[in-house]
Amino acid sequence: MANSRTHAIGSLGPVTAEEAHLLEKLDLERLPRHIAVIMDGNGRWAQKRHLPRVAGHRAGTQSARTTIETCARLHVEALTLYAFSVENWRRPKTEIEFLMQLLREYLRKEMPLIQKNNIRMQFLGRPDELPEGVQRDTREAMEATAGNTGMVLSIALNYGGRAEIVDAMNAILAERNGHGAGSAITEEELSRHLYTASLPDPDLLIRTSGEMRVSNFLLWQIAYAEIFVTETLWPDFNRGKLLEALLEYQKRDRRYGGIDAREKAAR
Ligand code: FPP
């Protein structure tokens, strides 16, 4: 145990004094299995610096890189990042095009890091509505990493939580093909038809930039997730901030609608 701890922490490379202090307090055996992140605040970050909004998105890719690498090295099973929602098509065309280009560039540039960390990539959302080039690049990224056995990195792209539930229901109907109309759909069956079918539900949902909303993200899956909202804007969300979120998660008492374990033992 001590060895795997030393190994996981050592794999993070040089850490600051503050990060070392946070790591000391962190129980690596009790990390969330699945972390989901709403990466918000890129626009505000840029605005504060009198830069165009897209400069915030570019800066945000660095936080994505740090979060991905840190989670993979700490052996988190799954990380899901909300990159583009079905609602984001309402943004100016130039910003949408920039985001799509940025994602393609990101996939190209970060592939060595993804491979080196044994990460398997997948994309959650409706691919058919994405530009051809994005569809091709995302497909290739999935294929190139399909044999990896480490963390599953899901990028939610053209994703909507309600759309996902509707898609799952339609997939069930299509599978039943007019049969089985009499048998009720179960939670288990619905879960199995979501984009996240192979993943455990998120234990921790992180949202940056202070907004207290879930914004149509993983609506079904976050039923029992611990929610961590930080005022930090996404481009400022560094490794130390991520470790703080993990420590906060470890302080929570997860009851899943039941009662506290100590309380139960005292009965
Ligand atoms: C929200 O900030 C952010 C987005 C809609 C885009 C997220 C994309 C990235 C971080 C870059 C690429 C990511 C990957 C995984 C390659 P906002 O624009 O809504 O910020 P605001 O609320 O301050 O305006």
Image (spheres, rainbow, N blue to C red):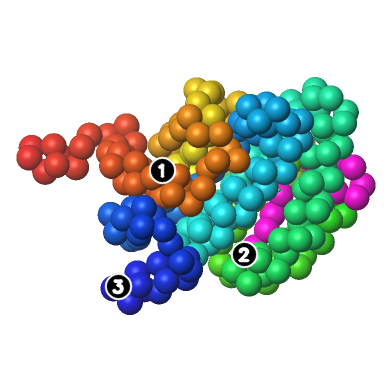
Q: Quadrant of residue 198?
A: bottom right
Give x and y (percent) for residue 152: 59, 58
* 220 or 216, nearer to the observer: 216
Q: Tell how many labels.
A: 3
The answer to which of marks 2 and 1 sits earlier in the sequence is: 2
The answer to which of marks 1 and 3 sits earlier in the sequence is: 3
Furthest toward the right, the residue is 132
Residue 1 is marked as 3
Residue 129 in magenta stretch: yes
Q: Residues within 10 Å of mark 2 (few under 14, many from 20)?
A: many
Check disc 1 and report the residue beneath it.
Answer: 245
* 172 or 5, nearer to the observer: 5
Camera-near label (2 vs 1) is 1
Check disc 2 and report the residue beneath it.
Answer: 119
* 199 or 61, nearer to the observer: 61
User: Image point 58% across, 38% down: which residue?
Assistant: 234
Label 2 beta carbon less than 8 Å to ligand 1: no
- The N terminus, quarter of image: bottom left
Q: Is residue 255 visible?
A: yes
